[in-house]
Image (spheres, grey):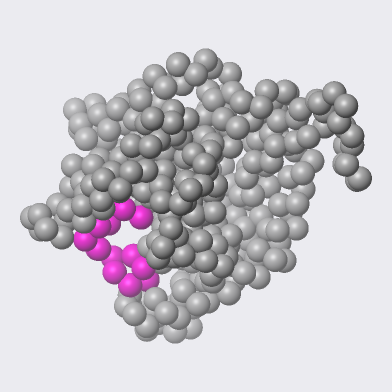
Amino acid sequence: MTDTPLIGRRVQIDGLRALAMIGVLYVHFWNKSPTTEHVRVSLFFVVSGFIISQILMTARDRGGRIHILNFYARRALRLFPALFVLVALGVIFDMDGFRGLAMWPILQASNIYFAMSGSFKPWITSHLWSLNALEQFYLLWPIVILLLPLRRIYVLVLFIFTAMILVRVNGEQFGLSGWWRNMVFVSDPIAMGAFTCLLMRVRAVALVLISRSAIIAALLVLAAPFYLWEGFGNSQSYRVMIQPALAVLVAGAFVGYGGLAGWLLGNKATLFVSKISYAVYIYHLMIWWLVGQYFPAIWAPGPTTFAILSALTLLAATISWYALEQPISRLKRYFPTATFDKPAGATTPPGGTSQTRIAAE
């Protein structure tokens, strides 16, 4: 580990987000049934829960005026530009019957529609279930973080974690189909990421989480399907076990790894992929559909499909970032998550205001 203070930095966590995105492309374009299938989505959820909790806890710690509505406005500015491109093209080309179902992704409720219908149709939005589950968590989490006492936040996040696992593992006893259990009741890794953020505030606990022993143990847990029985990687046991393991790796990335791991997570290429990862995620199945209309051979997953479609998706996401998402994202400066009165005797910086602001993604 580096000597970075435990308050940490986020650059390597962004690198983890890029790795999760590459895992999505690998599974969809190359290998539909990897040994560690649940790792990519769980990593995305744990990272997201950690990051958003860190942003909100920072705003809470700084005091001042908290603007929950501004938080939602910032999320909308980040989410909707690329999403509207997907919706517009889906409607224009009526991809897989998308035209009559466009409101579900706009309302961030595709996962609920899939659970009700029992199918991934329209297929070009099938991947949005995880994003929608995350955004549904975000609807309440800012209110929890910014308004509840800290001790109650610990209790609530543990309740969410255990309740989601209980419902998903034993959902049949509650009359829930597998679609509902796997599309809607999936907030446990998000809660694990949030809980890890809270634990990192306790220095003694943080030192344990980022210790070499904890990291080795986490890697052994993640690799378990390769040395235990066949199919363990698809079991509910593995799905639960990997969450604290991934939380340890996220905590380490928050403080900062050294050596090869630090370079892998923090180099410019990885961080650029992280920057455009949202558009990559939104567009990749749409691009597959569009390309497949003219080149049917591309429907077959494999290394060639992975190479071609990944390159096209990265290109589209790069154009989207510079031409659409980044310009709109700049509007977030008008919607600070929290504002603070200027300290006594402080001067206003050139071009600044009489307040300092916290910016949240």
Who's the residue at 25% across and 29% down the image?
A: 166
Q: Which residues are magenta?
A: 26-40
| Viewer-closest of 170 and 50 | 50
Who's the residue at 40% across and 26% down the image?
A: 157
Q: Quadrant of the C terminus?
A: top right
Who's the residue at 17% across and 53% down the image?
A: 224
Residue 324 in percent (x, y) is at 71, 61
- Does residue 327 lie above or below 61 as drawn? below
Query: Quadrant of the rendered structure where residue 303 is?
Result: bottom left
Residue 277 in view of the camera: no
Number of numbered discs: 0
Residue 296 in percent (x, y) is at 40, 82
Residue 219 in view of the camera: yes
Q: Is residue 217 left or right of residue 227?
A: right
Query: Quadrant of the rendered structure where residue 229 is?
Result: bottom left
Who's the residue at 54% across and 54% down the image?
A: 11
Q: Is residue 141 left or right of residue 176?
A: right
Residue 337 in percent (x, y) is at 69, 34
The single residue placed furthest to the left in the displayed view is 229
Q: Is residue 18 magenta?
A: no
- Does residue 211 lie above or below 288 as drawn? above
Q: Is residue 32 magenta?
A: yes
Residue 34 in percent (x, y) is at 25, 63
Q: Is residue 317 left or right of residue 252?
A: right
| Viewer-closest of 37 and 273 | 273
The single residue placed furthest to the front in the displayed view is 3
| Viewer-closest of 332 and 108 | 332
- Does residue 182 lie above or below 2 as drawn? above
